[in-house]
Image: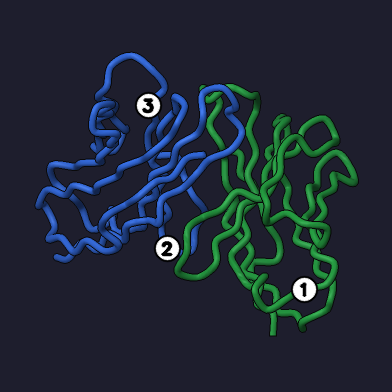
Amino acid sequence: AQSVTQLDSQVPVFEEAPVELRCNYSSSVSVYLFWYVQYPNQGLQLLLKYLSGSTLVESINGFEAEFNKSQTSFHLRKPSVHISDTAEYFCAVSPKAAGNKLTFGGGTRVLVKP
Amino acid sequence: EPEVTQTPSHQVTQMGQEVILRCVPISNHLYFYWYRQILGQKVEFLVSFYNNEISEKSEIFDDQFSVERPDGSNFTLKIRSTKLEDSAMYFCASRGDRGFNSPLHFGNGTRLTVT
């Protein structure tokens, strides 16, 4: 079984400031890792994913996440946030051997203030 | 860009009533899912569906739940006799193929309120 912990339920941040959203997971098997974003009144959208290879992955809108196997973490960062980044962010994992089922963290609500 | 469409956006029903949540996955997708999120809790996997049968289901997905792909476009989740604790946001998702190079596309969700 897998579990995902997002340590911060809410993160207020000023526009143009950096933000880091923490994600730790536990699993007895190897997993793929994901970050999803949910903008207000919308569904979940894939932000970025780690499948293999370079441990640093980037999204098209400036977010990046680094897979740290020894710390079982997949923290999400952005060096300078915009108002439009206000959303809820979900970390998720899925077993490599059975890729159908995502296990989500509790989500982190990011509120970007002007 | 193609979208997963869910209807209705909000459904209110009385305890004990049957409810059907509807989803139209992306047209060329082959794998279909339902997830739910009870208010204040994590998004939870319910069921996955491929080739007209359930491929995996969670402990939550008991005999009160069923899924169906009645035609070539719709994918439905039925709850036979709703309970108060079924109140949640229900998300439908679809994927083109099994690998994660094909990302999971989620709908905007149906908020189910059981009174």
What's the colour of chain B in the image?
green
Density class for disc 3 (Cα within 10 Å; few <14, some 14-19, many ≥20) is many
Task: Judge by depth and name the residue closer to the eye, B114 or B111.
Answer: B114
Label 2–label 3 contact, CB within 8 A: no
As drawn, is B88 to the left or to the right of A72? right
Density class for disc 1 (Cα within 10 Å; few <14, some 14-19, many ≥20) is many
As drawn, is B38 to the left or to the right of B24? left
Is label 2 on the same chain as label 3? yes
Res B56 quadrant in image: top right
Residue A50: which disc? 3
Q: Amino acid at mark 2?
A: Pro
Give the labeled residue for mark 1: B82
Q: Secondary structure at mark 1?
A: loop
Q: Secondary structure at mark 2?
A: loop
Whether A11 is drawn above or below B18: the answer is above
Give the labeled residue for mark 2: A40
Res B71 quadrant in image: top right
Residue B105: which disc? none
Task: Judge by depth and name the residue closer to the eye, A12 or A70.
Answer: A70
- Report the chain holding disc 3: A
